[in-house]
């Protein structure tokens, strides 16, 4: 069965994945002399940098995701299909999906990355990742449900496991989650659960490296450590999680921590569809591409964003897996498609580092810009501004801003709702039984 | 096992259900000379009159629900437990729940009503009810997923079943849902799905009675019919659904309609826990109570809201199952508990009819007040104002208002997101496998 698409007298570019890279590409290519087909398992674009705020009951999912159809509503020759990719057939230039087969002239992989459990099946089964809004919502429900349950547990040790939360990974996500949890403990729990002894609630942050925010400046790492310590987060550096059975975390030094919730933000790995040659597979599950984003050993297949591993002089191990790099690659590839169509020479990609940042708690952040690095309250304003500005859609910007204003002035997030899914009676594929996109 | 609760030197009132009736009672009784324990399967209060807007992607669930803990945050002697009720033991004055047993001095049933499928198991299995935000979200996902799927279905007849939607029940919910669906067809579908032929999309409304909004004034019924007809809704009066296999609806006159979505708003039935005597069971699954809300044949057990059937001179068949009646009963019962404590005489309940209303599409409504009835745009403003005013919480009011303003001025709801649940790895009970509250 073929996917039902009009056959236009134009080359067809099929893009898999509506993340930062895919969106940047399709935005620029829409309306040009190509037929663009965007495929995603969801009907929306997700703003990953704010997943943690959904998990912490600060924002609704709808504020940080944006419907793809709305985004490309008036774009001619652009078609959106919500489906799961099964495999690529590079010989026939065909992509197999659950909706059927689609032919391509050019295929662009913008499939991103997924949580890396480093092959530990037990941890993969029990720990909670945070790479989709569905997972963020799941975490929100789980945290709140455990506070509720803890009220009826009289055994101290058992109650501990419901109250304590372990965050694994000291990168931006781990730091931001740990900071928010500490705020929740400080401002929300005493009001919502006066029966709880909040001294019993511990937030642990486990980091494998010797500093937090490894990869950012030394000053940023130091300040992040200081801010989190002041918030009461128990930070364990140079420690790794070796086992987790759903009740108790074991570290490499033999320490164990009772915790029914382990938030896993310790690493990512690329997720590419079946059917590619082995020669293009790079480290970290990434796909090797040249400076034009073309996949090594494949004609007419490209890769951009987190999944792509492109070596530049300044980045011999590839670019950082950040939204910025993804967007820049998407834009460059779109421009090259346009140049190709006009018979112009292609321009190789060059990464422009715009800096990185992370927020810690209600009014602290660390910001590394190429020429200046700063931390504290002003950094937090910069963080707010940049994230607000980067959200898709005016309404999302307005609603997120109002939510932040509200939360900040009332010391309260008001989304502490355990909205449990009604189980599907029909075959809307779930996150879990879905094949890799 | 007992539910972990402090033993106070006060009479304990256990309230089951945080709907309109339960909330009204607890609000008034909190801080008084009783220990109040509110039990609900959810940690939030739901504003049922706006479920249909969640289903139609107009509002987020969080805008129309409110965390119970936040609501009763500063109320002394008030305790909230999120659990499922298993049964009542009236002899021992105990309530059995999944968290354990709780003793009561007074028990108040405010368990509300659930969807009535009139004993048809096939319909109950396949049709979509709308009595919780979870169900409303499920419907939203389902509608959008079917539009996506319809794009790849070439067979006309099969495609019809994905596009057509049948609404069963011509009461306020059915009328409001049908009106919103018609608006969605008119304003959203052509923009989001230019590939769809919207002529193929039909909205059916099936009503058993000879008029819509049966129970409201004749004028309201006529106008509702007129407004919906103008919006293109196909209304079938004096028809009943006799079968539905998930693909095809069969009516009592033999007509069949292909539709993979049947929204069931055709009736409700009370849901009471196990353990009550048979003598108190009234028609419609309701529980017979006297004018003081005391359950017939039981001491110390009361029932208020949709579950209660109280006969007044003016209401020989009981009060209408509306939020107004529930709130008034909750308030009256709380006041009587306070009177009881002070040794004062109790006051029997008298229902004060404040009127009823329904909205149809983007700027039409019908309103029946006790002394005046009107329909059209002004009625719609009244509807907006009353609903906005009735929502719990300032933030909810503000956010719903902004959402309405946005939706109204852009002809667009922007929540068309198919956010699929991540399946629970842990035992957060789902809506479906949960016992009756």
Image: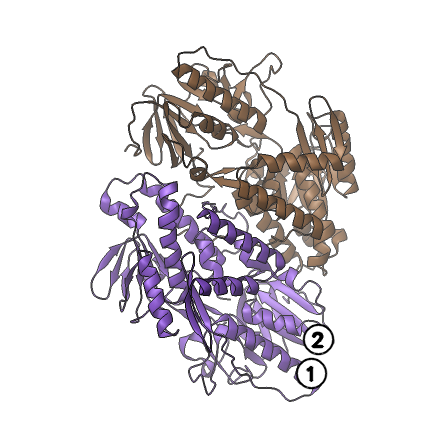
Chain colours: A brown, B purple
| Secondary structure state at the residue bearing disc 2 | loop
* Position of the C terminus of chain A by quadrant: top left
Q: Can residue A198 be seen in this snapshot?
A: yes
The residue at the far left in this view is B254
Q: Position of residue B124 (x, y in %)?
A: 36, 62
- Give the image quarter of residue B95: bottom right
* Position of the N terminus of chain A by quadrant: top left
The residue at the far top in this view is A345
Q: Is residue B425 above or below residue A274?
A: below
What crowding class fits label 1: few (fewer than 14 Cα within 10 Å), some (14-19), or many (20 or more)?
few
Q: Residue at x 38, y 21 (%)?
A: A106
Q: Are marks 2 and 1 in contact (CB under 8 Å)?
A: yes
Q: Residue A437 versus residue A159: which sits nearer the camera?
A: A437
Would residue A35 appear left or right of B135 to someone viewing this image? Answer: left
What crowding class fits label 2: few (fewer than 14 Cα within 10 Å), some (14-19), or many (20 or more)?
some
Q: Residue B258 versus residue A387: which sits nearer the camera?
A: A387
Q: How far apart, in angstroms, are the residues tagged by discs 2 and 1? A: 9 Å
Q: Position of residue A276 (x, y in %)?
A: 42, 21
Q: Can residue A206 be seen in this snapshot?
A: no
| Secondary structure state at the residue bearing disc 1 | helix
Disc 2 marks which residue?
A: B32
Q: Position of residue A293 (x, y in %)?
A: 48, 18
Of callouts 2 and 1, the N-terminal one: 2
Q: Position of residue B345 (x, y in %)?
A: 64, 89
Task: Say which mark, if any, is on residue B58.
Answer: none
Disc 1 marks which residue?
A: B341
């Amino acid at each position: 069965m073929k996917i039902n698409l009009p056959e236009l007298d134009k080359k067809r570019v099929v893009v898999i994945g509506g993340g930062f890279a895919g969106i940047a590409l399709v935005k620029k290519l829409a309306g040009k002399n190509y037929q663009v087909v965007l495929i995603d398992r969801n009907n929306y674009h997700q703003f990953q940098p704010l997943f943690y705020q959904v998990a912490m009951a600060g924002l609704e999912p709808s504020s940080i995701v944006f419907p793809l159809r709305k985004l490309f509503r008036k774009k001619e020759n652009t078609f959106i299909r919500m489906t799961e990719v099964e495999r690529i057939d590079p010989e026939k230039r065909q992509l197999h999906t659950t909706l059927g087969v689609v032919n391509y002239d050019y295929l662009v992989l913008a499939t991103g990355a997924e949580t890396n459990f480093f092959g530990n099946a037990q941890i993969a089964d029990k720990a909670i990742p945070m790479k989709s809004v569905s997972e963020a919502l799941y975490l929100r429900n789980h945290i709140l449900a455990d506070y509720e349950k803890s009220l009826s547990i009289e055994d101290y040790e058992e109650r501990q496991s419901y109250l304590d939360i372990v965050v694994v990974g000291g990168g931006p996500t781990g730091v931001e989650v740990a900071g928010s949890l500490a705020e929740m403990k400080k401002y929300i729990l005493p009001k919502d659960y006066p029966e709880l002894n909040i001294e019993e609630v511990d937030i642990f942050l486990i980091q494998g490296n010797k500093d937090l925010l490894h990869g950012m400046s030394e000053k940023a790492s130091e300040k992040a450590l200081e801010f989190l310590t002041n918030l009461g987060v128990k930070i364990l550096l140079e420690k790794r999680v070796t086992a987790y059975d759903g009740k108790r975390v074991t570290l490499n030094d033999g320490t164990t921590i009772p915790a029914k919730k382990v938030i896993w933000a310790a690493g990512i790995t690329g997720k590419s569809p079946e059917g590619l040659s082995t020669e293009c597979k790079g480290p970290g599950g990434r796909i090797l591409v040249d400076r034009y984003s073309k996949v090594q050993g494949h004609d007419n297949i490209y890769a951009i964003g987190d999944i792509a591993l492109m070596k530049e002089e300044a980045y011999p191990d590839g670019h950082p897996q950040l939204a910025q790099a993804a967007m820049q690659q998407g834009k460059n590839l779109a421009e090259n498609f346009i140049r190709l169509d006009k018979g112009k020479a292609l321009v190789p990609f060059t990464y422009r580092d715009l800096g990185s940042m992370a927020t810690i708690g209600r009014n602290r952040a660390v910001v590394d810009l190429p020429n200046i690095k700063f931390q504290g309250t002003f950094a937090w304003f910069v963080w707010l501004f940049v994230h607000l500005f980067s959200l898709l859609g005016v309404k999302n910007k307005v609603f997120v801003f109002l939510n932040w204003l509200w939360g900040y002035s009332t010391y309260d997030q008001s989304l502490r709702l355990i909205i449990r899914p009604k189980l599907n009676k029909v075959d809307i594929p779930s996150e879990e039984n879905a094949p890799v996109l």
